[in-house]
Amino acid sequence: MNNSYDLTLSEHGCKDCYKCVRNCPVKAIYLKENTTEISPSRCIACGKCFTVCPRNNKAMANSSIRVKALMNSNRTLVASIDPTFVAYFGKNYKKLITALRKLGFQYIEETSVASDILFNKYKEVWTTDQQKYYITSNCSAVNLMVQKYYPELINYMLPILPPMMIHANLLKEKYGSKSKVVFFGPCIAARIEANDESLQEIQKLDAVMSFKELREWIISEGITLKRLEDGCFDQEGSKEGKIYAALGLPIVEEELYGGKDFIKVHGAQNSREVLDSIKQEELDPAIIEINFCLNGCIGGPNFHNAEENLFSRTKQVKQYARNTAGTPSKEAVEFSDGCRRNFFDKRVWNELPNNLEIRKILKEMGKFKKEDELDCGTCGYETCREKAIAIYNGMDKTDMCLPYMRKKCETLSNLIFEHSPNFLFLVNRSLEILSINPAAIRHLNIEKTHDNKLHLTTVLDCLDYLEVFETKQNISGQKVYLEMQNLTVMQNLIYIEEQDAILAVLNNITTEEERVKQLMEVRQKTGEMVQKVIKKQMTIAQEICSVLGETTAETKVILKKFLDLTVEKSGDE
């Protein structure tokens, strides 16, 4: 098995709804650069984020690549199938075995073969050891959860491998150590636990593939289940083994459980509650079977979009167990090694801020006093202080607080709306004003009518508004003169389809228009004055020219006379 973490989130599909963050039972999803990521050290692979994501944005690394590589290894291929396949594949479940043989598996067995072994190993432990509590270890999500979040309870965990690993060890012994074993099941956590480094020396499973991946693989190979013949397992489990693998341990007399109480728990909330009770030693001596998925494996994330409902799936598994029960194989009866395991402290460490640091973070979320801490749980954390601790540890952000963001948005929106100098109002198709800001009321002189409503028709020409409602096309930058108010505005009408309403934004440009008008008047007067000056200058020039002309003529006459006189005198001499 590989050691990479198989659960991923696609940043391209995330639309910031944060539904996965709110619903993660252990808060293993954190925010990074406006998208969500899974923290492998915190995740228990319960698959809750897979089922709640509206964008189907969560994904597992595709196991088919590894499985196909195993098929090219020239080794004996063995398939181990969880008995819940009956509920997943419905009426075609018998044909699945034939499909697996077509894909290249030489041997196909039912994982419930190991359930009989598991139950016997459980009984060996609780009948020989004398401790107060025993917690079953068949659910991989619970195994991960106890090690990470309840490490003080690991001594109460039954030290037995889950059925898929016991079966893999049995199959390796049966078909040869070099054979390759692939487990097919509904559990996401099973794959993660199979990759656990602490188990690599004691479990021999080669690959884990979900039923969903198996269906996709079959389709990609052009195989149609309904056209195949029914197939048979090389080995299947007993009736009890089949039911246990799908629905859990039977609730029978106390003697079977060494006189201890038997507590059967399923679902995330119930799982945490019973673990908390064990931690506080509030329960009587008991054997506790915990399935993290609601209603057990057939209620897991792989069945999220199943065609059949939960009750039909349960009925299918029970009928299958009654009608196809086998007997434990000789190998299973004699199998004793390869079942034990240990649990380890893998606790998640959170740095705990002091009260001053918590108060600082709370203030950043707009929570200045105790009354502001609503503890609404909308963010996914039980209390505002828990959220503050998560923020301190980099697992959350302040803007994931809905009351805070709503208040912040309302405050900003109200500030803009109330103090904007523009005229802002929202009009419905009946031309009723749904909302209006003070600037519009003040300048447009809008008054309520007898029915206590504001009507646009009483103050403005509404033809443009009717046109926008009809065409659903916005009007931008239209200069309009409001005769009743003696105002000139730049009109912007924005159609909002969701509300079938128009947002009107009127920018009062009356003052600017007056300034332009005054400037034009000044320019006109200046032009007239210039024309007068030019005309006067021309007149003066003409007058000067006239005077100069007369003076020149007189000078010419005088000079002529003077010249003539001079010539006469010269002749006399």
Image (tube, rainbow, N blue to C red):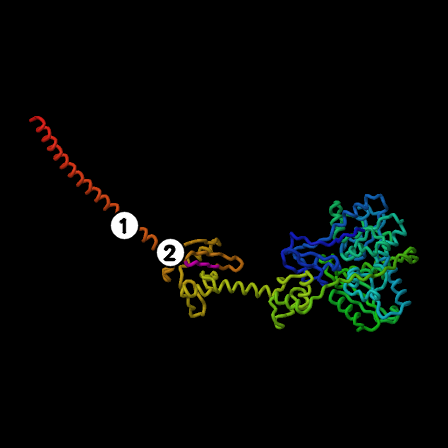
Q: Nearer the viewer, residue 561 or 106?
A: 561
User: Considering only vertical position in the picture, is 234 above or below 374?
Assistant: above
Q: Circle 2 is placed at which residue position? A: 513
Q: CA distance from mark 2 to mark 1?
A: 24 Å
Count neighbours of disc 1 (C-alpha within 10 A) and say few if under 14, some if 14 to 19, many if 20 or more: few
Magenta stretch: dominant secondary structure: strand
Q: Which mark is residue 529?
A: 1
Extreme residue in the front direction: 573
With 102 as the anchor, is 440 left or right in this view?
left
Q: Residue flagged by tag 2: what amino acid is it?
A: Glu
Q: Where does the magenta region start and end?
A: 503-508
Q: Residue flagged by tag 1: what amino acid is it?
A: Met
Kindly tell me whether residue 247 is visible in this rendering: yes
Q: Nearer the viewer, residue 303 or 350?
A: 350
Q: Secondary structure at mark 1?
A: helix
Kindly tell me whether residue 87 is visible in this rendering: no
